[in-house]
Image: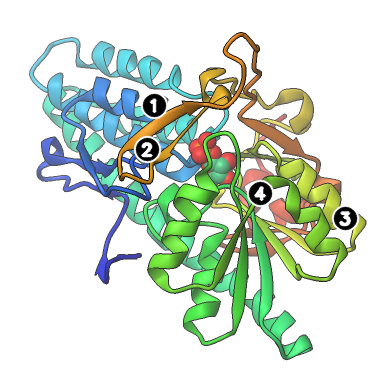
Amino acid sequence: MKIAGVVTRTIRFDPDRPEAVAVIDQRQLPHQLVWQPLPDLETAAWAIEEMVVRGAPLIGATAAVGMALAGMAARSTADFQGAIAEAAQRLLKTRPTAVNLHWAIAQQLAAVADCQSGAAAFDRLRLRAAEIIEADVQQCAQIGHHGQRLIADIYAQTGRPVNVLTHCNAGWLACVDWGTATAPIYQAFDQGIPLHVWVDETRPRNQGAKLTAWELGQHGVPHTLIADNTGGHLMQHGLVDLVIVGSDRTTRCGDVANKIGTYLKALAAKDNDLPFYVALPSSTIDWTLRDGVREIPIEQRSDREVKYMDGRTESGAIASVLICPEASPAANYGFDVTPARLVTGLITERGLCAASEAGLLGLFPEQGAQNHG
Ligand SMILES: CSC[C@H]1O[C@H](OP(=O)(O)O)[C@H](O)[C@@H]1O
């Protein structure tokens, strides 16, 4: 998407110059645009752990690049396979919930399985990383193409601007470009469909306030930032037409793990008979799992993220402030799981489907042949 009118992606990766890879440091947004170089595997792993980069698809893309950087470092060593396996283990320890991390690492390990030299393995890793990055862009564009119809249909029925609510940041900043939940919004907006987005601030890391509001503003999309607990009230008063969120891991039966608070939005949407859609690329589907509440690992992060807020002071300095008694313990669950029964439908790169095994296999029949879960 564009930053100040310049087409930009979240990660700059040239397979012919992998050592020059850099990512937007999303911890600095919206106040500063900072590009963070990723010179080696460890920096790539650190960037995922510290949420320099975040969002399931971008975590996957960064992991794929991290594996390529490990391959670059090991390209002249005899035990290059051991070094690549070690890199995979390092990356798997970064963040547990987004399945794209596992998917991307598995893709890279498969790419080098039959390599007989470090040089050949490095070539496979850097080229596969570039493919994964390009595929994410195309898949998110397709999610936008399929999802924009939902917004267009509501506009055709009502004849007034469509109010969409989204949670966290499932925007182009969570991907390489376009986003997942935001792709239908951008494409409907670009087609001239009048719309407005309610942006959940999304405590505790405030990805909505810091990232979604910023990227929508950069594109000129009308939006209003709201406290996380506002959505239900808006839905009760007819101010929301559609909820679209992203996913970090979706089971083969349509259960969805997403940023903490998503489940509560789904409950409110159900209670108000409003459509609740989840936008996701197939790299976010975990075909080995069926029951998301029981099986999806939920990341728990530092209590500091709950106890402190950071931002820009009135004097322009970036500061972090304690918002509770220092002695108060805090729990920081990063995600929750929305059961498929609360999901109206899934928006994938292959089209829309019901949040069910039949729905997903209808779009991805190749997965049905394998005995999963
Ligand atoms: C399109 S995936 C975006 C997804 O990732 C976010 O989590 P985090 O910022 O912690 O990586 C959130 O769950 C978004 O919906």
Which three-letter amino acid code belongs to the residue tagged 3? Answer: Lys
The residue carrying mark 4 is 227
Q: Are marks 2 and 1 in contact (CB under 8 Å)?
A: yes
Q: Which mark is residue 50?
A: 1
Residue 19 lies, in percent from the top left, at: 12, 35
The local crowd at label 1, few if under 14, some if 14 to 19, many if 20 or more residues have their Cα within 10 Å, is some
The residue pinned by badge 2 equals 27
Whole-Å distance between the Cαs marked 1 and 3? 34 Å
The mark that comes first in sequence, 2 or 4, is: 2
Q: Amino acid at mark 4?
A: Ala
Q: Is residue 5 above or below residue 139?
A: below
CA distance for labels 2 and 4: 20 Å
Residue at (64% x, 23% y) in the render:
297
Q: Earlier in the sequence, mark 3 or mark 2?
A: 2
Crowdedness near tag 2: few (<14), some (14–19) or many (≥20) residues, C-alpha within 10 Å: many
Q: In the rendered view, does 237 fall on the left or right side of 251? A: right
Q: SS of the residue at dot 3? A: helix
Helix, strand or loop under label 4: loop
